[in-house]
Image (spheres, rainbow, N blue to C red):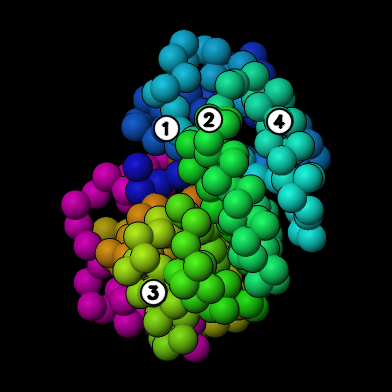
Amino acid sequence: PILLVGCAQKFDPKYDKILHRAYQAGVDYLDTAIVYADGQSHRTIAPFIKQIGDRSKLWITSKGPSKNASVESYTKDLDRCLDELETSYLDLYFMHFIDDQKFLEPEYLKMGDRLRASKKTRFFGFSCHGDRQVELLNKAARVGGIDAIMFRYSFARYGDLELNKAIDACRKAGIGLIAMKTQDSVPGDQQDVKRFNSQQFTLAQAKLKAVWADERIDSAVSHMDNTKKLAENIAAAKSPSQLTMNEFQQLQRMAT
């Protein structure tokens, strides 16, 4: 799906309404990590996996650990992910929050090969949040061995020429691209002065629609910690309507 459930919160292990409503609506991709919810996200997702009754109907991504990890710790933490989620495999395993090109050197890429070969994860990639996204995306496109990248991308970065070149390079290399932090904050005073006006979308929905309008982006992950946000985001994902030029222009004014 184009909308992914960000799992940074602790879910209700008995019956979580957000997870079940998302799944019923076709949002079957869960993005979690060892460190999410103070280490509790995995364990509260595990019961949901059992309730679905068919692991193959879910796409589950996890990450581990945070920053500056070694090959050994990434390998060990994949096993920890599987243990806590009570599953035999991940669909995608990310090196989390990387900010250095060393994580795209051969020793890490060979680790990715080994992890895929072990069938403990189907695919391998990384997430990046900081200011070095462009160089990391460009290197990933050059060296190969990376299936997918989750990176910070929103309407506020549409005019970033170097980032756009890096995104193009990744698409040409066949790397899947997942946008995060799509709800780029707009200063409160600007939001009051430059109020978003639309007959079809809320501001939050428009920010997602702007990302989905970029055909190079495969999916967007969203932190939805209540059913109202979930319903709003699902409605945006299912709507066949696109942003109008006026709506795009309003977002651009908010980004400046």
- Closer to the eye: label 2 or 1: 2
Point out residue 63 in the picture as x, y percentages from the top left corner.
65, 45
Q: Is residue 88 shown to the viewer in this render?
A: yes
- Closer to the eye: label 3 or 1: 3
- Closer to the eye: label 4 or 2: 2
Which secondary structure is most common in the magenta stretch? Answer: helix
Is disc 4 in contact with disc 1, using a CB cutoff of under 8 Å? no
For residue 8, what is the image quadrant? top right
Label 4: how many Cα within 10 Å (few below 14, some 14–19, many 20+): some
Going from the N terminus, do you reach mark 4 or mark 1 first? 1
Point out residue 62 in the picture as x, y percentages from the top left corner.
61, 40
In the image, taking residue 118 as reference, residue 33 lies left or right, namely right
Spatial separation of the CA atoms under disc 3 and disc 1: 28 Å
Does residue 7 lie above or below 240 as drawn?
A: above
Q: Is residue 204 shown to the viewer in this render?
A: no
The segment highlighted magenta reads 231-256
Q: Is label 1 in a helix, a strand or a loop? A: loop
Label 3: how many Cα within 10 Å (few below 14, some 14–19, many 20+): some
Whether residue 157 appears in magenta in the rendering, the answer is no
Q: Which residue is mark 2?
A: 119
- Closer to the eye: label 4 or 1: 4
Foreground residue among 78 and 227: 78
Q: Which residue is mark 1?
A: 28
Does residue 162 lie above or below 248 as drawn?
A: below
Q: Which residue is mark 3?
A: 169
Q: Amino acid at mark 2?
A: Lys
